[in-house]
Image (tube, rainbow, N blue to C red):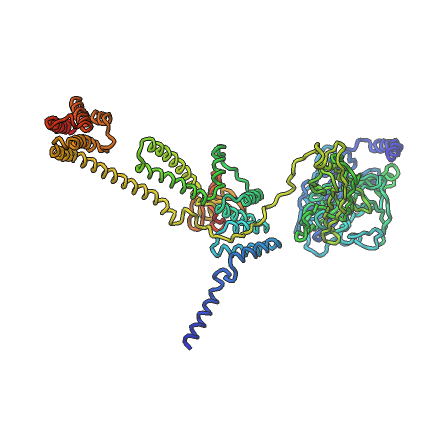
Amino acid sequence: MRPARLASFAILALCAAAPLVPALASTPRELFQSGNSAYEQGKFQEAADAYEKILAYGFADPRVLYNLANAYFKQGRLGAAILHYERALRLDPSDRDARDNLELARGLIRDRVPETDIPYPVKVLQDFLDALSIELVSVVFLCLYYAAAGIVGALPLVSGEMRRRALGYGAAAAWLCALLAGGALVYRIQDRTAAHAIVMADRVDVLSGPSADNTVLFTVHEGTRLDVRNRRDGWFQVSLPNAMSGWVPAESVEGV
Amino acid sequence: MHVPAACRRLPILLACLLVAWLWNGEAALAQDIGVRARVDRASVAEGGQVALTVEVSGSSLGEIAPPDVSGITDFDIVGGPMSSNRFQWINGRTSATRSYTYLLRPRRTGSQRIPALGLLVNGRTYRTDPIDVEVLQGGSAGAPGTRPPPPAGGPAVRGGPGRAQGSMRPQPEPEGAPMVRVIADVDARTAYVGQQVTLRVLLDTQTEILNLGMKDTPTFPGFWAEEIKLPENLEMRRVQQGADAYSEYTLMKRALFPTGSGALTIPAMTYQIQVRRRSTDPIESFFFTPTETITRRTDPIAIHVQPLPASSRPDRFSGAVGNFTLAVTADRKESRVNDAIGVKVRVAGEGNLNAVNALPLPDLSDFKQYSPRISSSTSVVGDRLRGEKVWDYVLIPLAPGAQTIPPVIFSFFDARAGTYRSVASPPILIQVARGADGGGGPAGAAMAQSDVRQLRRDIHFIKQAPDGLADRSVPLYRRSWFAVLLLLPVAADLGVFVYARSRNSQRANARQRRERRARSLARRRLREARRRMSPPTARAFYAEVAQALAEYVAAKFDTSAAGLTHERIEELLTLRGAPEEDRGTFHRCLEACDYARFAPTSSGPEEMRRTLLAAEEILVRLERSLSA
């Protein structure tokens, strides 16, 4: 009787815990396919549910995020769509489709925030780096770093003045390239870890302080991207590229 | 026509006035002017009307201005002023009375006051006494004997949809005033946004109308108003209301289209009407054409406007409300590349098309499309506004072959059915031949090119994952082995550095050891040479001495003895600063050994002993100089 009772308890515990975990009946791949087929049939909410389940598994694949953003876009939920396009681009900045869709979605939101003026060469460099995935930059940096370190390591083993001099120049060039790649990697890491948030509510009043009785400084609307500068007691201190800043309730925005 | 009649009577009037003046003997001055105000009832029900009469009486009235009623704030003036004159001639004294009558409607219940009104008579101001009127809430009130207002409905000849719900409350006329009323009337009290509501303004009268006009230009806020033309000569109809017969005229018709939803109001309109007055004074009737100008005002009409249903609204809804037909025609079915085709899109039907601005023809990729010429016209059929709008397009075919102008879809809201409807034209097939210059098609070298145009924008389609999904939430740089990979070259370089230093150190030690052992090795060779110092072994003796010298230099300079030539030895010794004399001695000794090795017969024991001594000596001297 005792083992049977234990088995019954185990089954009951499993049944109780079942709703707390993602649908174990489907693998992420099956969910992805079912989401895609629902999307193709115009069932965008159903598709979004399937993609959300995949994310609940911990599969942060940029294609899942991209498709989820598309499903939200088709439902007219611009804030959620922009949020997931941003997340997809963080994982795969080279995805031109996601970049195009994000630009299209941003063109449909109500707020138009002027970007800060960046000199043209810097803008070109930024665009170039933004299009590179952090994995690619990491691999390039590692290769250059190993090349430079290898040349430096070979220097003590080489005899002959000419050889040593040639190796010295090679080591300097390799280190310079490795430094540049390291700088690009740091830029990409900073970009990836920078705190941004998307406005999810229809309209949000940005206040002068982290409580509701503060002065309303300005209002932002769904889909606007904010830079998060500080967090405090359920409030985010946010700013816009044009230096306007204030506090918003944490539940009105979603971090990228 | 009355002016000539009045002119004809003017001499008679002047004669009578002359007689009266002569009879009285003096000019009547306005010393006995009396002014008073009265109302026809002391209490009135809420929403009812009270007639206010201001009378000026005196033996001679002269110039009288109408009373200033701007101070009446508790009442709306819904009619008036109606003025009348009365002359009396009693016992040779004349008296005249002029009265002004207004119809007032109280704005609130309770005791309301008509303030003192001022009149200007012969340049002097007179004031009436204020009058209090009790306004009762609901119910009915009024002085007995007041004529009840005519019934609103009744067996009227006039009719029309919505008459019962849209008709106004008839306005009671004060006693003695002519029966004239103006009624505003709509065909529907509820409508959708954009649906036509027809407004009619009717004039019912029992007296002759001499002239009429609107006091203000009518405005219809919240409506798009289109005038429905009336005949130049107003048509009169006879209507019967109870026992009263009226002549009815239509004064105005407007087709009103609500532009927004909610409660809209057609404001009141005020007419000033000049009518022939019934006069009981035979003299006045004889000498004058008694007229008076009265004011009539319609009541505002509330219209409830419903919004168009949003749930089933088609994507291409044009904003038109009504019932329309669509026709698309092309002026030719065959054309050539770059030859223009005229396409006419015509939308017509009952409703207002002025608000329709969307172009009905979609963008066509194989045609160059110019902005259309738009023309519109309206007409009225049975009080309903009919509109027609025509878009004249000019299309230039860009490619040869069978080109199709796709169906044009025009969506509108049918207010009567309460649903959206769409009408579509059939597709039009256009056979496009190559241009006259051979353009159009691969064979044509001069085909006109055009930019590929973006017709509309949408997001890119979803992605597939044929290679499966992968979790990329943890980037490469945050994996633990990435740090290991970063540290690995540093450690390797450090290892190489340590190894190289160790190797160099070992090499340096070996060189020093060999250098230290150079003299002992040379001595050992020289001892061996001394042992062979005899003529039979002269060759071996000299070989040992030469070997001792060469190996000494090789050991001192950490090089191989085999490759040492005289020049190299000279170079090395010079490099270490050996004196020239020692270098010369060293070379002579070495050359002597070389010579004796190849000609042993030429050297005896004495020669060998001197050579040995010279070798020992030079080694001692070199050891001293090189060590220094």
Quarter the N terminus of chain A occupies:
bottom left
Residue in the foreground of this view, choosing between A94 and B105: A94
Residue in the foreground of this view, choosing between A198 and A93: A93
Query: Is B91 left or right of B417, judged from the image as shown?
Result: right
Residue in the foreground of this view, choosing between B246 and A154: A154
Figure disc tally: 0
Query: Is B556 left or right of A34, judged from the image as shown?
Result: left
Could you tell me residue B418's position as x and y percent? 72, 53
Residue in the foreground of this view, choosing between B307 and A114: A114
Q: Residue B627 appears in which quarter of the rendering? A: top left
Residue B394 visible in this rendered orientation of the protein: yes
Q: Which residue is situated farthest in the bottom direction here?
A: A1
Could you tell me residue B543's position as x and y percent? 18, 31
In the displayed structure, A20 sits above or below B214; it is: below
Residue that appears at 65% across and 36% down: B451
Could you tell me residue B198's position as x and y percent? 77, 47
Residue B375 visible in this rendered orientation of the protein: no
Could you tell me residue B126's position as x and y percent? 71, 37
